[in-house]
Image (cartoon, helix red, strand yellow):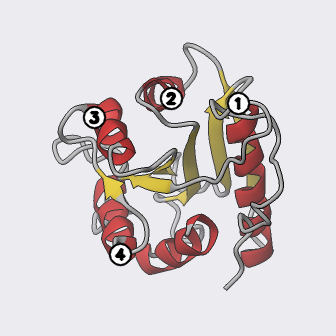
Amino acid sequence: MFNCLKKDYSKPSKEYGSHGDGENFKPIWGYIVPHTKDAQGAETPDNKWSEYKHGQAVAVKNAVVIPWDDRDNGGVSGAVKRLVSKGVNATWEGHLNAYRGDTAGMEILYIHGDDLSKHYAELIIDAFRIRYPDRNIRGLKAKRKGDRGYNNLRDAKRSGADVALLGELFFIDNPDDYLSPDEVAEFILGVLA
């Protein structure tokens, strides 16, 4: 299985995060289910899957390897605090895009100026490009205050995540762009575990 995040951690890493000069940073990933039980986000055209249900299916499939939580109790902050208490220092919030049913592509959001998160987002995009060479890559989206997704990322960082990413791997309302929970779980497991 391809894992773009595996490297030699015995050598000093870049001076990123809250780990000080010369210390190694090794991400310990946690997965955040998008949206909530009461507000489940966008849905497939047949209403079989919402972002929330899809995210839960991904989380449960990978639960043995990747800790997860949802936003039902305390939002992003609550989920991240619970994950950090389990040793997590990097979070992936697994959203799915939606727009008119005919748009396609994956993108990853991070906070503008957060070089550590950007670094891992670039690695994940590279892995996605290799895994799905015919898919549209919408790219990295650096978010600032007021932008879509910024508050989620800010809350993750404020709650203890050194790396905070909000990933949208496909458009849930476009059947031609859709990836099943099993496909997403396999990809997430390959890059985060």
Q: In the rendering, at what x and y percent does residue 152 appear?
A: 45, 30
In the image, what residue occupies the spot 28% across and 61% down?
Answer: 53
21 horizontally vs 111: left or right: right
Q: Please report whichever mark, 1 or 3, sits nearer to the chain's N-terminal start.
A: 1
Q: Name the residue that disc number 1 marks.
A: 20
Residue 64 image label? 4
Seen in the picture, residue 185 relative to 146 is either above or below; the reply is below
Q: Name the residue that disc number 3 marks.
A: 78
Q: In the rendering, at what x and y percent does residue 25 appear?
A: 68, 47
Mark 3: which secondary structure?
helix
Circle 3 packing at 10 Å, graded few (<14), some (14-19), many (20+), is: some
Q: Please report whichever mark, 4 or 2, sits nearer to the chain's N-terminal start.
A: 4
The kind of residue on which mark 3 rests is Gly
Q: Name the residue that disc number 2 marks.
A: 157
Q: Please report whichever mark, 3 or 4, sits nearer to the chain's N-terminal start.
A: 4
Which one is in front, 88 or 123?
88
